[in-house]
Image: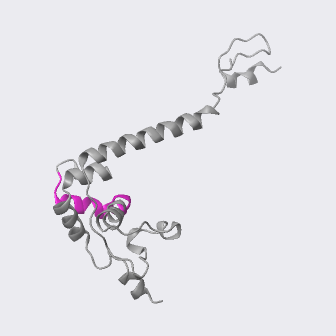
Amino acid sequence: MSDESHYKNNPLHGLGLKDLLTELVSYYGFDILYAYLHINCFNKNPSIDSSVKFLKKTDWAREKLEAFYMYTYKSFPKASDEQFQLPPRDRIVPEGQTAGEPAELSLEDAERLREKRAKKAAEYDSRSNRNYRPKRNHSYTSSHSGSKSSDPWAKWKDKP
């Protein structure tokens, strides 16, 4: 299969970042984009031009936006594990899969999702910290010649 047919099956092929962002902002608005993606360029003084400038410089943010476009706005099925390792512009959408209707999103749903993620993160943290044992606080006083130095490197001074 040629590279051309691979790219032909990607909805991002031939779509500029400014056009992509304009399409998303006109449908969802900056407030929804910020609520779901947590990218500050959509929150602090948002504009298409300043957001495009930031997204061009920041790979992780651009890839996050492109994945949002493909899987939330265009409603393509999630990528396979192998394809997920690639940036969204390099992913291949299997033959026969077409874009669906954009997902209906709301600020209330975004808040519920944020709370759910925070709860899951807290559970993960509590599970991973269960087996954690902090190091005991050892006193670094030297016992060699009765020295009461608190310097752990001072032992060399006590050797005869």
> Percent from the top left, x then y, of residue 81?
52, 66
Location of residue 28 with respect to 9 vertically, above or below: above
Which is more toward the observer, 85 or 11? 11
Choose top left, top right, bottom left or bottom right for residue 88: bottom left
> Bounds of the magenta span?
46-63
Residue 111 left/right relative to 152: left
* Residue 77 can be seen in this image: yes
Which is more toward the observer, 130 or 133? 130
| Total residue callouts | 0
Residue 109 left/right relative to 127: left
The quadrant of the rendering that contains the C terminus is: top right
Residue 92 left/right relative to 151: left
> Percent from the top left, x then y, of residue 159?
80, 21
Choose top left, top right, bottom left or bottom right for residue 116: top left
> Percent from the top left, x then y, of residue 50?
19, 58
> Which residue is at 38% across, 77% downward?
97
Location of residue 16 with respect to 64 vertically, above or below: below
> Which residue is at 21% across, 70% downward?
19
> Percent from the top left, x then y, of residue 15?
27, 75
Q: State the scheme by which the image is colored.
A: one colour
Q: Residue furthest bottom?
A: 2
Residue 15 left/right relative to 114: left
Location of residue 131 with respect to 141 vertically, above or below: below
Q: Residue furthest right?
A: 160
* Residue 49 can be seen in this image: no
Q: Is residue 94 magenta?
A: no
Magenta portion: prevailing SS class: helix
Q: Is residue 53 magenta?
A: yes
> Which residue is at 34% across, 77% downward?
98
